[in-house]
Image (spheres, rainbow, N blue to C red):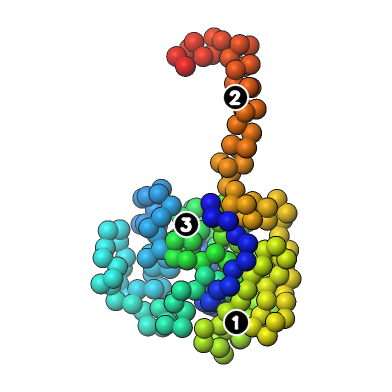
Amino acid sequence: MEKFDVLDGIVAPMDRANVDTDMIIPKQFLKSIKRTGFGPNLFDELRYLDVGEPGQDHSRRPLNPDFPLNHERHQGASILLARENFGCGSSREHAPWALLDHGFRVIIAPSFADIFYNNCFKNGILPIVLDAQVVHELFEAQHATPGYRLIVDLQRKAIERPDGEDISFEVDEFRRQCLLHGHDDIDITLEDADEIRVFEQEYRQRAPWIFAATGS
């Protein structure tokens, strides 16, 4: 997993509440578990004017001119500004995969669905919860300023506005350290690889019949 320290990025808006995971990545695109290649289908039903299907040449599909991610001012955005209860619905991990594959590393919202919130950290995305009024102010600033940027500093747990003012945010320390070091669940497990091997050897001696039955 890529490390996260400081991100200076363009902000793109998703100005609606209760955006569910089926809206983030529709169900017909869940056939792959490669974690990559989902970016073109992020917000597929909102982003395109036709019905999306796996295997299409997305460069030839008609874009919805009213959808913010299709606007020139939001190209290359790495910070998504959202409203309440972002990521609700089913628990599909493809949702953060699609967001990450598109280029988003930070999502700012007043609240998130719990499973989606946890899945973001596991896949290198920093979800930040801010007061609804603060989020509203960021939406207003973003709408008024083409190419609006924020600096997200995970070390300081602060978001720096263009005028230099900081917005502090809270994040679980364990999750913060995982992002700072680029550690996912597998990396954390492998840190104890030596102890795991010792346990396996001892357990093989205590219960040899289990390993005989499995042929291992």
At a point 63% along the width and 11% down the height, the residue shown is: 206
At a point 54% along the width and 9% down the height, the residue shown is: 209
At a point 68% along the width and 73% down the height, the residue shown is: 159
The amino acid pointed to by label 3 is: Trp
The amino acid pointed to by label 2 is: Arg
Within-10-Å neighbours for mark 1: few <14, some 14–19, many 20+: many
Q: Which residue is mark 1?
A: 139
* Residue 113, horizontal then vertical, whole percent: 60, 60
State the mark number for residue 97: 3
* Residue 190, horizontal then vertical, whole percent: 59, 36
Relative to 75, say whether 86 is above or below: above
Looking at this view, name the residue that lies furthest to the bottom: 144
* Residue 10, horizontal then vertical, whole percent: 53, 77
- Nearest the camera: 5 or 41? 5
Relative to 197, say whether 134 is above or below: below
- Distance between the alpha carbons at the discs numbered 1 and 3: 24 Å
Q: Are marks 3 and 2 in contact (CB under 8 Å)?
A: no
Q: Which residue is mark 2?
A: 197
- Nearest the camera: 63 or 171? 171
Which of the 4 quarters of the picture holds residue 131? Answer: bottom right
State the SS at label 1. Answer: helix
Query: Horizontal placement of 65 versus 211: left or right?
Result: left
* Residue 4, horizontal then vertical, whole percent: 60, 60
- Single out the mark in the foreground, 3 or 2: 2
State the SS at label 3. Answer: helix
Within-10-Å neighbours for mark 2: few <14, some 14–19, many 20+: few
At a point 62% along the width and 55% down the height, the residue shown is: 179
Relative to 196, say whether 8 is above or below: below
